[in-house]
Image (cartoon, rainbow, N blue to C red):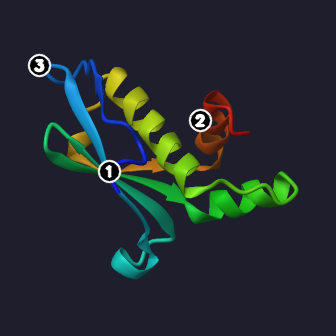
Amino acid sequence: MSYIVTPFEVTAKALSAPAQVRFVHLFPAIATRHSDTIDCWFRVNGQRVTVSISCAALTELRRQREGKTLSDQQLAEIAALHLRRTLERGYDATQAELYIDLAQLRKLGGEAGYL
């Protein structure tokens, strides 16, 4: 479902040229890697990067926001925003999995206009 997040380019301090980023897939990681996260896969210059969103953070957010939930579309956009910010700060996201906890979810969700 590459159409959920529009492909984008970001200037990454850790890379010699602008990074080409493309969304690949969003899925629950409980079944695939026994992780309590929602995983978003991206391709950064052709290499897979995983942005994991904590299910515990989503549950706590829902509890604190009186039942407000985030759609798959919104989660994919929040993950893309996190990846963009991470690359802009100079981190080479192709080296490891990126993780979004409750504090980051609130911040990114607010920045995206969803919270």
CA gap, disc 1 and disc 3: 26 Å
Q: Please give the name of the residue rendered at 68% of the width and 32% of the height, measured from the top-left corner.
A: 113
- What is the three-letter code of the residue carrying label 3? Ser
Q: Viewer-proximal residue, 6 or 100?
A: 6
Q: In the image, which disc is placed on residue 16?
A: 3
Residue 103 is left or right of residue 41, and the answer is: right
Crowdedness of circle 2 by 10 Å Cα count: few (<14), some, many (20+)? many
Is 63 located above or below residue 43 in the figure?
below
Residue at x 67% of width, y 40% of height: 106
Is the residue marked by circle 1 packed among few (<14), some (14-19), or many (20+) residues within 10 Å?
A: few
Q: Secondary structure at mark 1?
A: loop
Q: Which mark is residue 108?
A: 2
**Residue count near mark 3 (Cα–Cα under 10 Å), binned few <14, some 14–19, many ≥20:** few
* Percent coordinates x, y for residue 115 in the rendering: 73, 39
Q: Which mark is residue 2?
A: 1
Q: Residue furthest bottom?
A: 31
Distance (Cα) linking label 2 and label 1: 21 Å
Image-based side of 25 in relation to 71, left or right:
left
> Which callout, 3 or 2, points at the residue further toward the start of the chain?
3
**SS assignment at label 3:** loop
Q: In this rendering, which labeled residue sits more in front, label 2 or label 1?
A: 1
Q: 104 left or right of 51?
A: right
Quarter where residue 104 is shown: top right
Mark 1: which amino acid? Ser
Picture coordinates of residue 29, whole percent (x, y): 42, 71
Give the amino acid at mark 2. Answer: Leu
